[in-house]
Image (cartoon, rainbow, N blue to C red):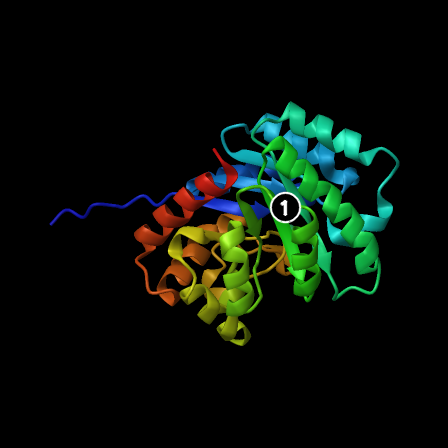
Amino acid sequence: MASVAVRMKWIDCHNHLQFFGAGAAESMVAAMVAAGVVRAVVNATGEGDWEAVAALAAAYPERIVPAFGIHPWQAQEVADRWQERLRELLGRFPQASVGECGLDRRVAAPGVAVQGSVFLVQLRMARELRRAVTIHCVKAWGRLFEALAVEAPPPRFLLHAFGGSLETARRLLPLGACFSCSGHLLQPRQAAVLEVFRRLPRERILVETDAPEMLPPPEQVSHPLPENRNHPANLSAIGAGLARALGMSVGEFAELTSNNARECFGW
Ligand SMILES: [Zn+2]
């Protein structure tokens, strides 16, 4: 009996392809496409990598959608008039979103007050320009709700690598939040967060690698790299693992998360 090969199509809603260096991009994008990863949102982290992300988006317009922003860990390094340069960059890339930005109380410096002022500017810009915004939030949920009360988010925004509680998720849902899960969630110590994802509305779930960070367990590493770096082409193996963990078929999960990514980012 002839078997029909089902071709999955995945969208990586959050990675940092620029961290691998410009010379690595061609082979990495080819590996992603060969693995069924048809698109990736490549997130900048500060002014120092905005142009690298812009260059990737210009070189691979079918495959890479950029996000430009200031990561909370870099909030103290902003130069004068960074807002103008960010706005200009978003104008150059109409499909770009704002990110990665947010709040992180796990790091000692910069403090959340510094992080918060840079975050609020980005929230406002995303809303004004009608762009999605990708939020990194670690141990700062109270601060996040305060920020969202000061600057309302755009209609759709993404909590990347969401690690909060079900109660937190339920407060974020009516505001328009989407939530992405990485292969990290398949580590045994992440069982509680996986349980939160099982209870989220399916139409708000996206999938990401966060490459080169967040290496999944060995079974999901289809493309090993030195120094435990996570290859963005691992997404299809990660997605298959997450589909099983969430009680969905792999095809159903690929289609669901790809549709949700298009909806969240407004493509
Ligand atoms: Zn990230």
Q: In terms of image quadrants, where is residue 243?
A: bottom left
**Residue 237 in sight in this render:** yes
User: Residue 168: image x %, image y %?
Assistant: 56, 65
Q: How many numbered marks are there?
A: 1
Q: Residue at x 63, y 46 (%)?
A: 152
Would you name the residue on which mark 1 appears? 152
Question: Is residue 163 placed above or below 40 in the rendered structure?
Answer: below
Residue situated furthest front in the rendering: 149
Residue situated furthest right in the rendering: 80
Question: Is residue 20 placed above or below 168 in the rendered structure?
Answer: above
Q: Residue at x 44, y 52 (%)?
A: 204
Q: Nearer the viewer, residue 41 or 116?
A: 116
Taking the image as shown, residue 254 lies to the left or right of residue 176, namely: left
Q: Amino acid at mark 1?
A: Ala
Question: Is residue 62 placed above or below 236 in the rendered structure?
Answer: above
User: Residue 23: image x %, image y %?
Assistant: 66, 36
User: Residue 79: image x %, image y %?
Assistant: 87, 38
Q: Residue at x 54, y 51 (%)?
A: 175
Residue situated furthest top in the rendering: 92
Secondary structure category for the residue under label 1: loop
User: Residue 118: image x %, image y %?
Assistant: 78, 46
